[in-house]
Image (spheres, rainbow, N blue to C red):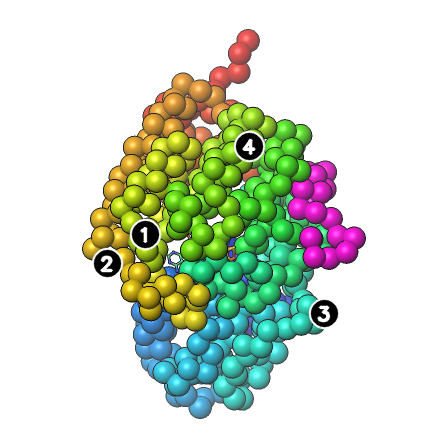
Amino acid sequence: MKRVYVHTFGCQMNDYDSGKIRALLETDGYEPTEEIEQADLIVVNTCSIREKAEDKLHGFLGRARAIKRRRGAADAEDRVLLAVAGCVAQQEGEALRTRYKDLDMVFGPDAVSRVVEIVRQAAHEPVVDTAFLDAEDYVFADQLDPRAASQVGAFVTIQKGCDNKCTFCIVPATRGAELSRPADQILAEVRALADRGVREITLIGQNVNSYGLKVPGERTFAQLLYAVAEVPGVERIRFTTSHPRDMGPDVVQAFRDLPQLCSHLHLPVQSGSDAVLRRMKRFYTRDRYLALVDELRQARPDLALTTDFILGFPGETDRDFEDTLDLMAAVRFHNSFSFAYSPRPGTPALTLLDRGQEVPADVALARLQRLQARQRQLSVEANQAMVGGVFPVLVEGWSRHDEGVVCGRTGSFKMINFPGDPSLFGQVVEVVVTRAFANSLKGEQARLAG
Ligand code: SAH
Ligand code: SF4
Ligand code: F3S
């Protein structure tokens, strides 16, 4: 039996693709391993969203190459095969092979469903596969990640690619055009996962709210949510990522109607300044975003919102930054991911840099730190407001820190640790919150009244 080690950088889409890579290779006799030293095939699934993400690949390849060289001659039958997959592979293609002669395979996200053929071919000659497929030829693999059976939650992809052109973003170049996966396939995968004991489904795509709109007769995203909610065994539904422009009233309504839909929404805003949003080509205003937040909270008063911010986007002034801080406080996000703007190859925002609109790195960093400090306060306050309350928690497994302590998430996506045992794994239990930190909670199982 040959062994495959898959290392994943990047977003939920890559995480999911890595699961498909493991699943497909399993059908060809490869057993997944967590030990890179024991692998016959090493796959690194890469991300290029920011320069730092791309740098991680180079660190990893240095290590992987050393293992490969130690394990045998480059022309031996049983040599270790080394593959780069994902967004950097798509972006760099052949150039990666030029830089790293030891690479046997470079393949992009569209090639995932062909991974078995690619690996077979690579045993004889190096393979570079970065072709984007036409919609008719694209295959959403339906094999399940072998890890899914032991997990309480799983991702299910509903679309690939992205048709937006946010000017900072590399994703349209690395993942190609948006394509919605047929709803019947999505529902079949959800049912298969629920049959294996998965309790929480997270529907994923770069812009889930535009699901189905370009396919005549396909369900809309809201209709898909209602259909998933009917699958027996699915206790919780989440989805990511939502673009504020495309979030329609029917999805807001779903937060009223569907108890399975968790009270958490990740709604990336990027900036609180209309001028910056315009240059990012996000196609919503600060007021529209705030109005949407109001509508969502009317539908689901306990909705916990999280977001993404980019600081130091070209032309961002102190005033723009104050507007962002102001919006952050107005919404009271429970958490946020914030990044200094990183110029990406071939993206439209580069022309703003050419026009001299670059924000100096130290200014961007200072803004980032101020925003993150403010977020920590907001997160602690949001979590402290939960102390004393009782919340249903889906138990995921042992806590990483203490013996006899289990962990899970509230509907609002807060990680909570509390004393428990394995009989609780995969169950939803009522937990009273006893302590709050910036990034997690502590609690105790609530005693039933009576
Ligand atoms: N599809 C999602 C986002 C995917 S990328 C959406 O539309 O919101 C995840 C996050 O990375 C983005 O929300 C953005 O905040 C950040 N990001 C993307 N490109 C970036 C860049 N060039 N520099 C810094 N951050 C970036
Ligand atoms: Fe990138 Fe914008 Fe598409 Fe998100 S919606 S993946 S930020 S282009
Ligand atoms: Fe990174 Fe590609 Fe996801 S660039 S964020 S892995 S779509």
- Mark 1 = which residue? 316
Q: Secondary structure at mark 4?
A: helix
Residue drawn at (41%, 24%) of the image = 386
- Mark 4 = which residue? 296
Q: Amino acid under label 4?
A: Leu
Q: Secondary structure at mark 1?
A: loop
Q: Earlier in the sequence, mark 2 or mark 3?
A: 3
For the residue pair 124 and 140, the one nearer the viewer reads as 140
In front: mark 4 or mark 1? Answer: 1
Say whether marks 1 and 3 touch (CB < 8 Å).
Answer: no
In front: mark 2 or mark 3? Answer: 2
Residue 58 picture location, percent across and down:
34, 71
Q: CA distance from mark 2 to mark 1?
A: 10 Å
Residue drawn at (40%, 70%) of the image = 345
Q: Amino acid under label 2?
A: Pro
Q: CA distance from mark 4 to mark 1?
A: 29 Å
- Mark 3 = which residue? 136
